[in-house]
């Protein structure tokens, strides 16, 4: 077992983990050596009950959500997970149009491969509102800590390529669509590891299971599956079928007015297919819902 470089305690290591957090003093350290940088965290500001209530009233704003959702949706199971992210300040020194300027950007990336392909992958993390890591807070809130399997060196490489893209985007906004960049040198100004608390929840509605994820710091919904009211589906299906019938009817007039007939038939067909698709769905899925709704 590796030892904590700060207090010397032996720290348990799971397969794949390359950065560990000492459960005694909270120090984060890279097993292979090297600096981690600041270790920050998001505080848990909302209980699971508060997050559940916030999620339900958020879901009710969608027209598809059943009217009895508030009373009939029940929490089945949940986990509070502190997910790891690397966050960076990258500075680009840009030589363009005879002048030199510095452009600072913030980039973040998931620090565990299991987050790839999930709603957490493209979540933009910022050090704003984060506090210094406290292991006691994780224990007191009953959270599970996920340790990075993406080490600092690998994260640096990813951050530099994300940083290059972000610097170029920012230059385009400032100097027009095709800035003439003669040279661009990038350096990492700061690196931090952030553990962000997320409620990963399963709930039931009329014997079916659905999932949602919410940020435990600000209660914003990160991912949600919401059932669709039967009446909404019936109405949408009926409208879709009418549209498809209209498409057939206009096609029947193709001999008399070919252009008109084809154009309107295509229109009816598209509208009809979208409605039928919507009517056949059992649930709505919402990804990466912005904070502060
Ligand atoms: Zn320690």
Image: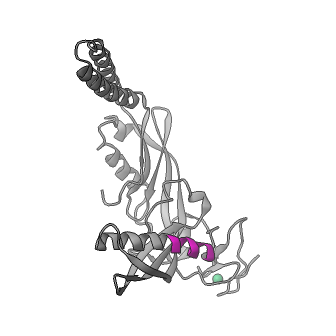
Q: Is residue 123 above or below residue 75?
A: below
Q: Depth check: give the residue in front, 43 or 177.
A: 177
Asked if residue 240 shows in the view, the reply is yes
Q: Depth check: give the residue in front, 20 or 55.
A: 20
Q: Position of residue 178 (x, y in %)?
A: 35, 68
In the rendered structure, the answer to whether residue 101 lies left or right of residue 156 reads left
Considering the image in quadrants, where does the C terminus appear?
A: bottom left
Magenta: main secondary structure equals: helix
Residue 248 inside the magenta-drawn segment: no
Residue depicted at x 41% and y 74%: 167
Residue 158 inside the magenta-drawn segment: yes
Q: Quadrant of ligand 1?
A: bottom right
Residue depicted at x 62% and y 69%: 150
In the rendered structure, the answer to whether residue 62 lies left or right of residue 45 reads left
Outermost residue toward the right? 1
Q: Depth check: give the residue in front, 178 or 275.
A: 178
Residue depicted at x 51% and y 65%: 141
Q: Give the image quarter of residue 22.
A: bottom right
Asked if residue 140 shows in the view, the reply is no
Q: Position of residue 166 (x, y in %)?
A: 42, 70
Q: Magenta part of the protein: which range?
A: 153-161
Q: Position of residue 111 (x, y in %)?
A: 57, 67
Residue depicted at x 70% and y 86%: 8
Q: Is residue 28 above or below residue 114?
A: below
Q: Position of residue 41 (x, y in %)?
A: 48, 73
Considering the image in quadrants, where does the N terminus appear?
A: bottom right
């Amino acid at each position: 077992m590796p030892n904590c470089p700060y207090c010397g305690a032996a720290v348990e290591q799971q397969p794949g983990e390359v950065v560990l957090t000492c459960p005694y003093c909270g120090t984060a350290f890279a097993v292979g050596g090297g600096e981690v940088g600041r270790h920050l965290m998001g505080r848990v500001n909302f209980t699971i009950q508060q997050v559940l209530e916030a999620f339900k009233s958020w879901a009710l704003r969608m027209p598809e959500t059943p009217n009895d959702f508030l009373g009939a949706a029940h929490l089945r199971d949940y986990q509070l997970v502190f997910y790891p992210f690397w966050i960076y300040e990258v500075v680009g020194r840009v030589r363009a149009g005879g002048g030199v300027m510095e452009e600072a950007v913030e980039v973040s990336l998931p620090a565990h491969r299991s987050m790839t392909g999930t709603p957490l992958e493209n979540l933009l993390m910022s050090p704003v509102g984060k506090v210094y890591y406290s292991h006691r807070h994780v224990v007191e809130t009953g959270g599970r800590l996920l340790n990075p399997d993406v080490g600092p060196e690998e994260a640096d490489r990813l951050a530099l390529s994300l940083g290059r893209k972000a610097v170029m985007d920012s230059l385009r906004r400032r100097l027009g669509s095709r800035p003439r960049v003669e040279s661009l040198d990038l350096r990492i100004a700061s690196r931090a590891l952030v553990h962000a608390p997320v409620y990963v929840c399963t709930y039931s509605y009329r014997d079916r299971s659905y999932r949602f994820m919410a940020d435990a710091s600000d209660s914003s919904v990160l991912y949600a599956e919401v059932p669709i009211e039967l009446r909404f589906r019936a109405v949408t299906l009926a409208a879709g079928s009418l549209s498809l019938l209209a498409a057939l009817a206009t096609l029947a007039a193709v001999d008399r007015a070919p252009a008109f007939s084809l154009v309107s038939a295509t229109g009816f067909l598209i509208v009809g297919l979208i409605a039928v698709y919507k009517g056949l769905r059992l649930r709505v899925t919402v990804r990466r819902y912005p904070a502060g709704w």
